Amino acid sequence: MAAVIAAVVVVAVLVLLFAFAAIKVAREYERGIVFRLGRLLPEPKGPGLFLLIPIVDRMVKVDLRTITLNIPPQEVITKDNVPAKVNAVAYFRIVEPKNAIVQIENFMVATSQIAQTTLRAVLGQHQLDELLSERVKINAILQEIIDEATAPWGIKVSIVEVKDVEIPANMQRAMARQAEAERERRAKIINAEGEFQAAERLKDAALVIEGHPTALQLRYLQTLLEIGSSNNSTIVFPASIDLLRPFIERAEGAARSGSGS
């Protein structure tokens, strides 16, 4: 009787061990790549519950979620011979689980290495100004090259972003001086444009005064009035009789007209 119970217990334990080894569960974002006696099965397993043959089958799980890859800082020399240290971030996911396991030994390490070499190569073909002002264009170039290189491994690179660009301190000071000179240049151009427009208006005013001499006298008297109202001190201006001549002649003409009538 004891022998029978022991045999039942042994059988139950073996069944449990078999079930534990045979029954597998893959999450929604996971796929199981199964090798049966070393041969790759055509279709990945999962998601959900599936069975494996113990000892015969060996499974490798692959995560299909988007992976964030930090590209470490790279020392690059730009096209205009400026040294810079640049780091970036790449987002990729596995679209062909079988290729990610069979075609490459370690897809994470391989993707990181190809991203680093591509970053140095691409940035070396652009000038510093392009690197600072045309990030979108450079990011697109990086994404296209890295995606093309990793496509045989079943990897899709969706985004590559250049994060930080560090340049030497002396180059930063030179760029600051350049920016300051550019601002001064724009200020001078704006000032010159203002002077030109003011000169144009003065020229128009001169043409008006030339055709109407009385306008000059009125402008002179208006200036005296403005100065007198803005200052408490008494200011004496010598006035030429020629300035008052038009008013005198007009007054004399009015007097003659009145006496004649």
Image (cartoon, rainbow, N blue to C red):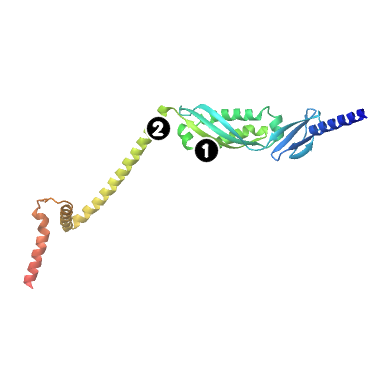
**Which callout, 1 or 2, points at the residue further toward the start of the chain?**
1
Q: Judge left or right: residue 44 versus residue 124.
A: right
Q: Which of pointers 1 and 2 indicates the residue nearer the eye? A: 2
The residue lying at 60 percent from left, 36 percent from top is: 91
The residue lying at 50 percent from left, 33 percent from top is: 164
The residue lying at 71 percent from left, 33 percent from top is: 61
* Amino acid type shown at disc 1: Lys
* Amino acid type shown at disc 2: Met
Residue 43 visible at all: no
Residue 83 spot, x, y in % from top left: 47, 26
Q: Is residue 251 above or below residue 123?
A: below
Residue 1 spot, x, y in % from top left: 93, 30
Task: Give the total number of marks visible in the rendering.
Answer: 2
The residue lying at 9 percent from left, 53 percent from top is: 240
The disc at residue 256 is none
Residue 161 visible at all: yes
| Label 1: how many Cα within 10 Å (few below 14, some 14–19, many 20+) | few
Residue 176 spot, x, y in % from top left: 38, 33
| Furthest-right residue in this view | 1
Q: Considering the image in quadrants, where does the C terminus appear?
A: bottom left
Residue 5 spot, x, y in % from top left: 90, 30
Front in this rendered view, residue 223 or 259: 223
User: Which residue carries the number 2 mark?
Assistant: 175
Q: Secondary structure at mark 2?
A: helix
| Furthest-left residue in this view | 259
Q: Judge left or right: residue 27 versus residue 178.
A: right
User: Which residue carries the number 1 mark?
Assistant: 137
Q: Secondary structure at mark 1?
A: helix
Measure the C-alpha gap from mark 1 to mark 2. 22 Å
